[in-house]
Amino acid sequence: MLLVPAATAWSAGARAAEQSPPPAPAAAPQAAAGKLKLVPEQLSTLFKIDDDNPEAHVPSVKDRSSNPLEFGYYLQDLLTRAEVAEKQHNQLAIIKYYRAVAMAIPEEAQGWGRLCEAYQNAGDRDRAVRACKYAIDRKGAQAKDYRRYVELITAKPGDLLPEDRDELKAVFAHLDGQADMAVLTAHLRCEAGVKMKDQAALEACTAVLAKTAPDDPKTIVFQWSLAVMRGDRDQAVVLLERAQKAGVAQANIDRMSQVSMVGHGLSARGIGVVLVGAATLMLALALLGVYRRRLTATRRLAP
């Protein structure tokens, strides 16, 4: 969970007061109706939360700066309510509370990242993309924010627009300067390469992954995608066998097998269909990783 240092004074730039979350939807997809049950008592006695409309009484920059302890408690209160909403699968409430967090500390990445995830879980891709864009443009952005942003863009149906490609280039240009994110950057570049059918990008990212994570199922599937793009049937068959040994789901192995046995000379349309399937497989592997992380992650808030 997001850790909130209750006694720390939050920075207050002039831009903070002018920023706000993406417009709220009339109703989020699959959102549960009604108020939260068993809403916990507030820690903050100064900044009260309207559970029907948490954005209605977000403290001003002046108030948060002059009452840092109470503001820290207020943030903790919002996060606690968001956690209760998550346990109750109340997606609309989750979004409302994280919108208030993002509005309360707009210059920080954490609230925007949480809001992005909430919109993504609600199936609202456009708002998720916008919130994630805000997150990666602010201080404190984490690797998961970049990953989610790239995954949201590459999951877009159909071909990417020029502006989408420009966004991906900008993200990769930033990540290339982060030595500790080399593996993440390679994964994301491969995902984008599959989506855009970019052989040069796949060659570059798989070369990195072959050294840093040679036995990762994602690495093997990316290498297989590159072999298919090149029309190298023999290499595709070899990588198919490695993918099976690495634990890739049988349904995906079956789809890969059908392609690998076609032989040389796949048409451009055929390659496109194959790589769309590979992109779907990458999404399935990513979701599996998220599920496993959630099973092991602690859900306690910092005191």
Image (spheres, grey):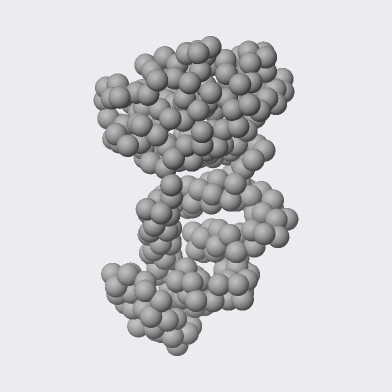
Residue 7, percent across and down?
Answer: 63, 26
- In the image, is 295 to the left or to the right of 77? left
Who is closer to the viewer here, 169 or 187? 187
Above or below — where is 267 with respect to 6?
A: below
Who is closer to the viewer here, 266 or 129? 129
For residue 211, which quarter of the picture? bottom right
Q: Residue at x 58, y 51 (%)?
A: 143
- Residue 27 visible at all: yes
How many numbered callouts? 0
- The extreme bottom residue here reads 234
- In the image, is 113 to the left or to the right of 91? right
Q: Residue at x 55, y 58 (%)?
A: 188
Above or below — where is 47 with respect to 209?
A: above
Who is closer to the viewer here, 7 or 63? 7
For residue 82, which quarter of the picture? top left
Residue 66, percent across and down?
Answer: 67, 14
- In the image, is 19 to the left or to the right of 148? right
Q: Residue at x 60, y 68 (%)?
A: 205
Residue 299, percent across and down?
Answer: 42, 42
